[in-house]
């Protein structure tokens, strides 16, 4: 994205400003530009390795309408989820999907899922469609007990540490223990594959380790786990073995060469500012926060004596205008980099204050536009997402409810054997 400039002199944001003044609700909105999203989807599809599949990361795209839109254009029904309420929602909204947990859930959360499974799902078959992520022999033992309790087969995807060092097994000795447990309990456990996350690749300074070196090392490590499983547990390694990897920061590296057949992506498609990475330079920012201006005046007015405001105003030429906006304190920054938080006034989630230069022609009811730094938490804060195309609102998509338990949330479930 080019260096941000005033929303009033950028045709794109001025058009969006006028659209929201006509059709918005007069509150902060999260906006998705479908034309930009389509561009990013085309970029993702370009040069994908043969026999690889995309898996959409639901926490980064936490909205059923948005996921449906992307899934349809990618012909994709594979999702990764990290949150029990989102897992339940996906089983209902995408009953034909294949789901992979992106982190190991506590045994209690897994138990709750199976307690409510027959009640809340819509034809979703967990024994065929759901892969649980397991990171230690101890957690595998917990999951085995759950499988025995509910007389279910649990598909086990083993988390491997390929350099990130955030968890997962680090050696084939531990792998041997876990695969032996799975082999000894075929009635309740099924080995379904590996998940190796490589978000560390490209994060180290080049003088410490170049990106390609880091990537190749992570791939070699991943391959060593595959080789061990295939050599010593061939009966568990079916042709459909899931080999999940990648993520938005490294998805483009996997297009060149990868040991994985299942590639995760989410944030890159809407490109919040934390994903302004060289590897994603061809992707466009497609998500923005728009917040109405409530109050505007010249100069800076701070609590306390007037001389203090005048003094600070003279010392800060970039603070010759004061804006109070609807809401604020988001994990985001203004598109126009000349707008700054007022550190002396302090943060507010109700009426945030921004200061800007004298030549900014912003008025009450205009909008300040922000880029979220990330999508997974920020997208949930604004109610329905507004999907726009060619300067028109074409969809209003409800976001996932992170607190929902099920349609029978008020019911009590027995936890006794």
Image (spheres, helix red, strand yellow):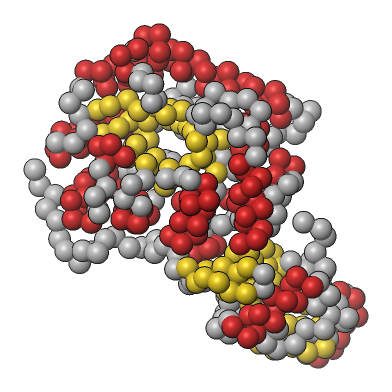
Q: State which quarter of the image contains the C terminus.
A: top left
Task: Name the residue: 58% across, 22% down.
Answer: 219
Task: Name the residue: 16% across, 63% down.
Answer: 411
Name the residue nearer the viewer: 288 or 77: 77
Q: Residue 155 falls in which quadrant of the image?
A: top left
Q: Residue 9 falls in which quadrant of the image?
A: bottom right
Against 252, residue 172 (above or below) is: above
Name the residue nearer the viewer: 319 or 239: 239
Q: Is residue 166 visible?
A: no
Name the residue nearer the viewer: 269 or 290: 269
Residue 397: image x %, image y %?
47, 68
Task: Name the residue: 11% across, 53% down.
Answer: 414
Q: Is residue 59 left or right of residue 359?
A: left
Residue 176: image x %, image y %?
35, 15
Q: Is residue 81 left or right of residue 408?
A: right
Q: State which quarter of the image contains the N terminus.
A: bottom right
Against 204, residue 78 (above or below) is: below
Task: Name the residue: 59% across, 30% down.
Answer: 49
Against 59, residue 160 (above or below) is: above
Q: Is residue 264 visible?
A: yes
Residue 12: image x %, image y %?
75, 70
Name the residue nearer the viewer: 82 or 44: 44
């Amino acid at each position: 994205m080019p260096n941000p400039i005033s929303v009033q002199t950028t045709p794109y944001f001025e058009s969006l400003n006028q659209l929201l003044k006509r059709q918005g609700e007069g509150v902060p909105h999260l906006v998705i530009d479908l034309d930009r999203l389509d561009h990013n989807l085309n970029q993702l599809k370009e040069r994908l390795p043969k026999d690889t599949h995309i898996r959409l990361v639901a926490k980064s795209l936490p909205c059923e309408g948005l996921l449906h839109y992307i899934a349809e254009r990618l012909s994709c029904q594979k999702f990764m989820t990290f949150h029990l309420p989102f897992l339940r929602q996906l089983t209902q909204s995408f009953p034909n999907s294949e789901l992979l947990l992106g982190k190991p859930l506590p045994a209690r959360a897994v138990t709750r899922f199976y307690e409510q499974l027959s009640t809340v799902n819509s034809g979703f078959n967990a024994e065929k469609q759901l892969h649980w992520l397991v990171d230690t022999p101890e957690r595998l033992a917990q999951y085995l007990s759950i499988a025995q309790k509910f007389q279910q087969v649990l598909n086990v995807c083993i988390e491997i540490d390929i350099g990130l060092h955030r968890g997962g097994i680090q050696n084939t000795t531990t792998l041997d223990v876990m695969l032996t447990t799975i082999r000894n309990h075929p009635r309740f456990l099924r080995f379904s594959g590996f998940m190796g996350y490589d978000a560390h690749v490209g994060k180290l300074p080049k003088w410490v380790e170049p990106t390609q070196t880091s990537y190749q090392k992570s791939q070699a490590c991943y391959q060593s786990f595959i080789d061990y499983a295939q050599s010593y547990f061939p009966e568990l390694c079916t042709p459909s073995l899931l080999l999940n990897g990648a993520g938005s920061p490294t998805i483009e590296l996997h297009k060149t060469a990868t040991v994985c057949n299942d590639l995760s992506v989410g944030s890159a498609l809407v490109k919040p500012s934390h994903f302004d990475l060289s590897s994603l330079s061809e992707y466009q920012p497609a998500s923005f926060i728009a917040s109405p201006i409530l109050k505007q005046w010249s100069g800076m007015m701070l609590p306390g004596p007037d001389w203090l405001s005048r003094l600070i105003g003279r010392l800060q030429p970039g603070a010759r205008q004061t804006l109070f906006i609807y809401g604020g304190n988001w994990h985001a920054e203004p598109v126009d980099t000349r707008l700054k938080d007022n550190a002396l006034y302090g943060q507010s989630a109700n009426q945030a204050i921004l200061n800007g230069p004298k030549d900014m022609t912003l008025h009450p009811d205009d909008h300040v536009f922000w880029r979220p730094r990330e999508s997974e938490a920020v997208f949930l804060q604004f109610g329905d997402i507004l999907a726009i195309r060619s300067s028109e609102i074409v969809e209003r998509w409800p976001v996932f409810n992170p607190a929902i338990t099920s349609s029978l949330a008020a019911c009590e479930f027995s936890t006794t054997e």
